[in-house]
Amino acid sequence: MESARKGFDASTDAVAVITARGVVTGWTRGAEELLGLPAQDVVGRTAARLLDAAEDPVRAARIADRCRAGAGWSGLAALRDGDGRRTDVDLRVSAVFSMAEEECFLVSARSLCSQWEVDDSVLEGFLACAPVGMAVMDPELRYVWVNETLERFGGVPREQRLGRRLSELLPGMQADALEGRMRKVLATREPVMDYEYVGWSWADPHRERAYSTSFFPLTDAADAVSGVCYMVSDVTERWNARRLLSLVNEAGTSIGTTLDVLRTAQELADFAVPRFADHVVVDLLERVLSSEGQGAWLTDAGPARAGTVMRRAGMRSVSGEGSGAFVGVGEMAGFVPAPHAGDLLDHGDPVLIPLLDPPDGQDPAEQPLRIARIREYGLHSLIAVPMRARDTALGLTTFFRSLNPVSFGPDDVLLARELVARAAICVDNARRYTREHTAAVTLQRSLLPQALTGGTALEVASSYRPADPTDGVGGDWFDVIPLSGARVGLVVGDVVGHGIGAAAGMGRLRTAVQTLADMEMPPDELLAHLDDLVLRLSDESADPATAHRDTPTFTGATCLYAVYDPVTGRCAMARAGHPPPVVVTPDGHASFPEIPAGPPLGLGGMGFESTEIELAENSLLGLYTDGLVEGPEHDMEHGMARLGEVLGDTGTDLVTLCGSAVRQLVPVPQPDDIALLLARTHLLAPARIATWDVPPEPAAVGRIRAEATRQVEDWGLGALAMTTELVVSELVTNAIRYATPPIRLRLLSDARLTCEISDHSSTAPRLRHARSTDEGGRGLFLVAQLAHRWGARYTADGKIIWAEQELA
């Protein structure tokens, strides 16, 4: 080992003394031998000329500071010898010292080319027993030398490797790619480090393994490339960990892309095949798939037992034929057979069956069809993972392997558990959303009018399209309300927000509008009262002292209310932040009346204005919500113009026109509800209207009563003549006795027979029960008993008392 000790001898090192200014003041014989430069050519000159590359001033300053602090420095550097060739050295710099009142550094260098000389047996033992596989290839990429570690990695004996190429021995090792990199090393002399690849070898032919390989050139004494050496490390565990992490991250973006239970279950199966398993089935409990029971999503049922009904929700196989081993999607599915059933879904621990032979430990006579199918399709390993989320059992996911000959192991269970856990959260979110959405849709449908009728005054049709399920149920609503005097009220509105809160708010507002309309309020007053109601509801939902923690916040709404009178052909309307109606004349010309917009409901403190327009016979009035005209481009003016064009086809049936308009304007699902209400106007024929001015004297009662009775008989309503006589008598008598002239009686023969008495008094009539000794006070009581309904409404000049009778 004398030559080895020589490597530790510092007496032959090249030594120089360099001042802080970078001038060489001392140069030893070792320095002359290392660089081939005599002292007279170096001393007194700058040391920078000895460096092979440009000096790094920052590095030099840092080294100098370290040495001035009393510490030395060592590192690698590249120098130029006397012939200009590069020489790599191990450089050492001492702490600073003073010489001739000048800072100096003692610098020593040792060539990196010097090698230890060790015994050949030591070197051979080191290379052969190293934990890294090593091999030497000749320029033709044939094996020249192989160590024992590489021999074990490949499973090919050393004597069979020597003289042969990698592609001839290990076809499963990506031989073409590896030989390509070795040729690159031979051509460029540049090493290739840490090239990772996956493949199988004869040492373990049924399992993929990962390797990290480095290649570097070998040169002879003449500096010619004589071959390639490569080193191989088995990095399967690291590669598996990285692969599992990548799969888990990828699963986060591939599973649960929608709020659909079945779609989520299928996404889990699609993701796992063939990445992880050859066959995957996802079975969910019946109650998870069921949308019945609108409150069931608030609480969950008790434990899931082996007898609990499950259905196949998702399934994927590496081949279409392989799916024949399992029941189809939607069919009944069973648990993992005993002894693994029991409370499998409740305790949540996965079941690993590395070898299905015989399947599940069962006697083949007990389940002949199941076992025959498992053997037919080559299913040999199984992992069953319960799907649980938020302490709730949802179902079971089972992974099978058939084409992949490697059985599942404990590491695979960890990945399976993680995949199913992510999918379980998505399934639970989807089923909760589905049930809440179903409840909201059911609530909304129940609150919308089931049948619309405008009597003889209006022919009506409506179309409602809910929002895209992923955006939740909206709060759009519409209604047609019969009013007194053959008039009809039309309303359309939109509650802000989505979900059950919006649907419930819509129902409350629709009920409020019906109540206020029955009170015969004009459009502006009705909206003012509705605004007060919305403001109160908003305050209640925002007050923590009165609102339940699950109470949705009521944030506001928009509304348009119109009243059409078929006697005059005029329509009064007002709007609260809602789009204006569209009016299409009988000749097909569309326009949008200029109605003051008014603030949305719920702001408070601002008034509303009514506008009255005249509608010709057979005009088309359209009320709609903003979702119909906003469209995907969110240009409302363009959408309104298109709506007018679509509704210009006056010859189309109203129901057909309504549905066609929605389909043309909104061909695909939108994030907002869409409501369209169309009404075609009709005028009440003058022959069906009779009017009398009533003198304010009791003697006029008999004459007016007789004329009204004759008019009813002329209309062919003789069956109502007697009751009409009594109603007219009582109303006219009360008006003459209590009201302010002028007094006028009007009879309308429409869907009902209406009797109206108008005067200039604002005193409201009051129904009371007269005592047996009273001579009067029974007029309105009799009217209420004889008429289908009765009431009063106020006008600009006074009031109108009206009573309606049903036609036979």
Image: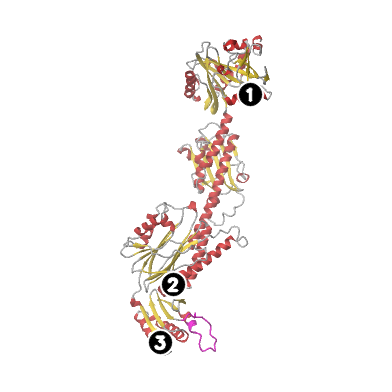
For marks 3 and 1 on the same chain, the one whose residue lies earlier in the sequence: 1
For marks 1 and 2 on the same chain, the one whose residue lies earlier in the sequence: 1
Q: Nearer the viewer, residue 481 or 184?
A: 184
| Residue 744 in the figure: left or right of residue 26 | left
User: Local crowd at mark 1 within 10 Å, few (<14), some, or many (≥20)?
Assistant: many
Q: Is residue 208 above or below residue 599?
A: above
Residue 755 picture location, percent across and down: 41, 79
Q: Quadrant of the C terminus?
A: bottom left
Residue at (58%, 55%) from the top-left corner? 298
Mark carried by residue 483: 2
User: Local crowd at mark 3 within 10 Å, few (<14), some, or many (≥20)?
Assistant: some
Residue 183 picture location, percent across and down: 47, 20
Residue 807 picture location, percent across and down: 40, 76
Q: Nearer the viewer, residue 294 or 440?
A: 440
The residue tagged 1 is 64
The residue tagged 3 is 695
